[in-house]
Amino acid sequence: MAEYQLRIREMPEHEKPRERLRDYGPEALSDGELLAILLRVGSVGINAVQLSQQLLREFGGWRGLQRAGFHDLLGRHGVGEAKTAQLKAALEIGRRLALLGGEDRVQIKSPADVAALMQVEMSHLDQEHLRAICVNTKNHVQKIHTVYIGSLNASMVRVGEVFREAIKLNSAALIVVHNHPSGDPTPSAEDVLVTRQIVDAGKLLDIDVLDHLVIGQGRYVSMRERGLGFGR
């Protein structure tokens, strides 16, 4: 016998996600229930909560959904353009909120902290992106600035552009991050040369370059830890 599926509006009042959020607060809801509120409706034979649970399983949770491209989501049964746009917008709001707010602002204490902040988004990019993370004297993130898109080349990357936002924000330091679309984060000779140029420029500008991370698929390399471009 086929499983009988209740639509959300047919559920008891105390089981409906929006009503549970209203009565108990968002922290009381499961991931599936929160996502169901964004999606609003399910599809034929599946309600919004079940569709949400299916998506979370298929993509490996929130990080997987954030990593997924627009058309990766759009191709799933029951997920149209409007639902995809709502979901991607909500995930981007969450990412931006993580970068805001005085003492609650993200603090960088190690290369692992940088990877946790950047890897989900950057590991799936199909071009190289070079980004500068501006931080204050307590290593709280002030801004993440995209400096360059394209194959990393010392003759193409304008070192002054790396520091542009840091100078505007009176940042104490910055961390450089770029990705390798191949998935292998092993630094190239060009990566080392670019790093050396940026580190030298930082000394002249009195802005400390804390690290340069290369992001791959599920892995990263800290060039400072390896002494590449920073010296020892």
Image: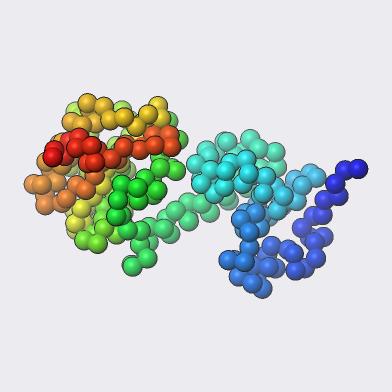
Residue 101: x, y in percent? 37, 65
Lateral position of residue 175 relative to residue 1, left or right: left
- The quadrant in which the N terminus is found is top right
Residue at 23% across, 37% down: 226
Residue at 50% across, 41% down: 67
Residue 88: x, y in percent? 53, 48
Q: Nearer the viewer, residue 51 or 79?
A: 51
- The quadrant in which the C terminus is found is top left
Lateral position of residue 134 relative to residue 202, left or right: right
Q: Nearer the viewer, residue 1 or 72?
A: 1
Residue 178: x, y in percent? 32, 37
Residue at 68% across, 68% down: 20
Give the quadrant of residue 182.
Answer: top left
Number of numbered discs present?
0
Lateral position of residue 73 relative to residue 42, left or right: left
Residue 53: x, y in percent? 67, 49
Give the colour scheme of this rendering: rainbow
Residue most toward the right? Answer: 1
Residue most toward the bottom? Answer: 23
Q: Is residue 153 visible?
A: no
Residue at 39% across, 34% down: 216
Q: Is residue 115 above or below residue 180?
A: below
Q: Nearer the viewer, residue 146 or 202?
A: 202
Give the quadrant of residue 122.
Answer: top left
Q: Is residue 169 above or below residue 63?
A: below
Q: Is residue 138 visible?
A: yes
